[in-house]
Image (cartoon, helix red, strand yellow):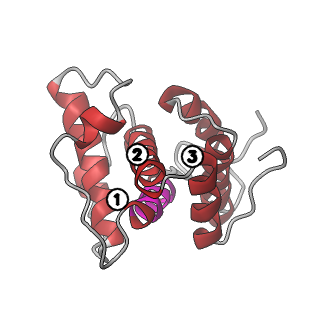
């Protein structure tokens, strides 16, 4: 992996979004593999993709529950769309829940205090934000009746991103 500490944080922000969306567009919705696609953009002391991934999750939520349509019910949401993840343990469950809520806040126009709430987390917030991306992307695909690759393309378009070749 090339050293990225000198790279502009805005560039890393966009690249981390493009990386996760390119993987989703290729049909990969395994949270752990998606984490591997984003990991190169987590540069200690320089940049963390927390906000970048929460923006992707928020955009996917917008597709799953556009204004004026039926709201997405929180009850049972993780059971329906993250059943393949083992969210055992209070800490893991709460941190994933926080990422899901944070993306919803951002979609609604409220920017959560990520540094105060999750700044010292290990593993870092972005690892939980990947689960929020998966959850909201799967929900959007389900509710729209389209493949996950279509959701990824629509989110990329909303965020003004070009996805890598092969998508």
Q: Which residues are magenta?
A: 52-61
Residue 145, how many percent across, how many down? 49, 52
Residue 101, how many percent across, how many down? 25, 55
Instruction: Please identify the dominant SS of the magenta region.
Output: helix
* Residue at 30% across, 36% down: 80
Q: Could one spot residue 118 in this view of the protein?
A: no
Q: Residue furthest front?
A: 145
Can you say whether 154 is above or below 31 in the image? below
Q: Is residue 104 magenta?
A: no
**Left or right, 71 with reference to 85:** left
Total labels drawn: 3
Discs 2, 1 touching: Cβ within 8 Å: yes
**Left or right, 92 with reference to 142:** left
Mark 1 and mark 3: Cα distance apart in space = 19 Å
* Residue at 69% across, 47% down: 22
Dot placed on the residue nearer the N-terminal end, 1 or 3: 1
Neighbour class for label 3 at 10 Å: few (<14), some, many (≥20)?
many
In the structure shown, which secondary structural element does the residue marked by tag 2 occupy?
helix
* Residue at 56% across, 55% down: 151
**Left or right, 155 with reference to 11:** left
- The numbered dot on residue 129 is 2
The quadrant of the rendering that contains the N terminus is top right
Q: Residue furthest right?
A: 165
Residue 132, how many percent across, how many down? 38, 46
Quickly name the residue at label 3.
148
Q: Is residue 57 magenta?
A: yes
In the structure shown, which secondary structural element does the residue marked by tag 1 occupy?
helix
């Amino acid at each position: 992996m090339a050293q990225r500490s000198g790279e502009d944080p805005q560039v890393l922000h966009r690249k981390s979004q493009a990386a996760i969306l390119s993987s989703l567009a290729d049909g990969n919705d395994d949270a752990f593999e998606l984490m591997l696609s984003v990991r190169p953009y987590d540069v200690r002391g320089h940049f963390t993709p927390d906000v970048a991934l929460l923006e992707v999750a928020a955009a996917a939520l917008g597709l799953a529950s556009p204004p004026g349509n039926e709201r997405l019910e929180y009850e049972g949401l993780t059971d329906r769309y993250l059943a393949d993840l083992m969210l055992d343990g209070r800490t893991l469950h709460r941190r994933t829940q926080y990422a899901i809520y944070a993306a919803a806040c951002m979609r609604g126009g409220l920017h959560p205090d990520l540094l105060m709430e999750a700044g010292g987390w290990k593993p870092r917030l972005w690892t939980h934000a990947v689960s929020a991306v998966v959850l909201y992307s799967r929900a959007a695909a389900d509710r729209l009746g389209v493949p996950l690759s279509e959701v990824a393309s629509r989110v990329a378009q909303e965020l003004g991103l070009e996805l890598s070749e092969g998508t």
